[in-house]
Image (cartoon, helix red, strand yellow):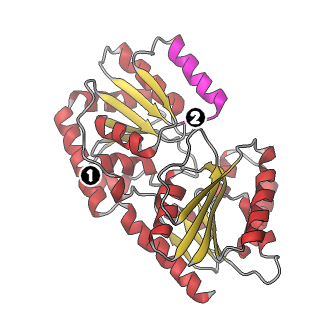
């Protein structure tokens, strides 16, 4: 049985993609003893499968994360895992050092969650700095045996790669589905994911404020977390606008519990801003809403191919609050059509957009790399 290191210096240990989907999938093969190393949070690992070990790294500031890189290097140098999968661009530097360990030749795979080049463009990094990053990233990627793209659109900027690659979407995992336990008494909009401005944090609150002004009866449940300062900003907005009875910030929640909340809700939300890193993407949360059988509102530049094919939600221009209000009111006042959208979304999930399909692509890549090592 091969020792498989699944590591992150950024993501919480219970991140849905890297733990519940990927670590579990590798463990289920019986080929790997998986050591999953990621960042601590306020949840304690429980019910861990027998061939998976969870090890927690201290949550540190951006500047302090180098201490975790050192800890990871020491662990890898000691255990000499056969396979390493990492999930953060900052660990590209660490992998270049791993490649220099004498007489050690692990399979190393980078699971690319975001297109960093596009992220830097959004932050208006000077052109010379962006060119330097691209050059450095290209050199560091040579340490990788393979690359996994979380979005197929990332490939456009990484055509120079000569190692094997595959695209693995973060679709929901079939075993996570449970029977619906009934709906909330009040029409409930729900969000599950990281909370920030570029992911529509403030947009959701402004939408709620407008719906209250229209005297609509609803509740908005927001599950997830963000930076402490940003969450405080949202709490202040809620208090200043008298929205305490309409919006609940639920904080971090175990995925199985969060999924039950989604099933009980009436409509999901995914209001990403038109960022270069997001354009044309397939935001994960929409597929979780589909798996739960609820319709959703989504930014009008996301998953339009899915929307056109399955009619499982409504698109809205996140820069136009009037349009967003109109779409939200439509869902509120058309419960039968909203329910039908949810059923179409669930059918689409079962046929196409589930983790079982993506898992096969992921495992095939690692089978290929292991056969060559």
Q: Quadrant of the C terminus?
A: bottom right
Q: Which residues are magenta?
A: 225-239
Residue 315 visible in the snapshot: no
**Mark 2 → mark 1, Cα distance in angstroms:** 29 Å
Q: Is residue 298 above or below residue 335?
A: below
Say which label, 2 or 1, has the lower sequence index.
2
User: Magenta part mainly helix, strand or loop?
Assistant: helix
Residue pointed to by mark 2: 197
Outermost residue, left direction? 336
- How many numbered marks appear? 2
Q: Residues within 10 Å of mark 1 (few under 14, many from 20)?
A: many
Q: Which mark lies nearer to you, 2 or 1?
A: 1
Quarter of the image for residue 173 reads bottom left
Q: In the drawing, does residue 370 fall left or right of residue 68?
A: left
Q: Residue at x 42, y 73 (%)?
A: 360
Residue 215 visible in the snapshot: yes
Q: Residue at x 21, y 40 (%)?
A: 339
Q: In the drawing, does residue 225 fall left or right of residue 295?
A: right
- For label 2, the SS is loop
Marking on residue 346 = 1
Q: Nearer the viewer, residue 70 or 157?
A: 70
**Does the magenta-highlighted stretch encompass residue 235?**
yes
Q: Residue at x 73, y 57 (%)?
A: 90
**Does the magenta-highlighted stretch encompass residue 2?**
no
Outermost residue, bottom direction? 372
- For label 1, the SS is helix
Q: In the drawing, does residue 98 fall left or right of residue 262?
A: right
The x and y percentages for residue 229 are 66, 27
């Amino acid at each position: 049985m091969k020792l498989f290191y699944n590591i992150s210096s950024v993501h919480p240990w219970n991140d849905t993609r890297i733990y519940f989907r990927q670590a579990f999938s590798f463990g289920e093969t019986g080929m790997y003893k998986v050591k999953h190393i990621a960042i601590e949070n306020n949840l304690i690992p429980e019910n861990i499968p027998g061939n998976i070990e969870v090890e927690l790294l201290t949550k540190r500031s951006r500047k302090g994360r180098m201490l975790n890189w050192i800890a990871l290097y020491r662990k890898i140098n000691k255990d000499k895992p056969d396979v390493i999968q990492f999930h953060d661009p900052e660990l590209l530097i660490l992998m270049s050092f791993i490649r220099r360990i004498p007489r050690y030749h692990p399979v190393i795979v980078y699971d690319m969650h975001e297109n960093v080049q596009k992220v830097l463009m959004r932050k208006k990094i000077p052109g010379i700095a962006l060119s330097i990053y691209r050059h450095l990233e290209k050199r560091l990627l040579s340490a990788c045996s393979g690359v996994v793209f979380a979005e197929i659109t990332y490939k456009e900027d990484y055509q120079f790669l000569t190692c094997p690659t595959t695209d693995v979407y973060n679709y929901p995992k079939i075993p996570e589905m449970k029977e619906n336990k009934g709906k909330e008494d009040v029409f409930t909009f729900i969000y599950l994911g990281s909370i920030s401005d570029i992911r529509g944090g403030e947009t959701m609150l402004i939408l709620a404020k407008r719906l209250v002004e229209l005297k609509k009866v609803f509740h908005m449940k927001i599950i997830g977390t963000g930076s402490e300062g940003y969450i405080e900003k949202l709490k202040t907005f809620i208090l200043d606008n008298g929205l305490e009875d309409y919006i609940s910030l639920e904080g971090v929640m175990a995925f199985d519990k969060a999924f039950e909340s989604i099933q009980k809700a009436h409509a999901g939300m995914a209001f990403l801003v038109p960022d270069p890193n997001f354009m044309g993407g397939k935001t994960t949360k929409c597929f979780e809403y589909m798996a739960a059988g609820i319709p959703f509102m989504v930014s009008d530049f996301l998953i339009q191919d899915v929307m056109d094919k399955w009619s499982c939600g409504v698109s809205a221009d996140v820069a136009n609050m009037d349009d967003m209000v109109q779409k939200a009111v439509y869902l509120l006042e058309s419960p039968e059509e909203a329910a039908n959208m949810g059923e179409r979304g669930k059918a689409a999930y079962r046929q196409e957009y589930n983790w079982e399909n993506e898992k096969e692509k992921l495992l095939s890549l690692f089978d290929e790399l292991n056969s060559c090592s």
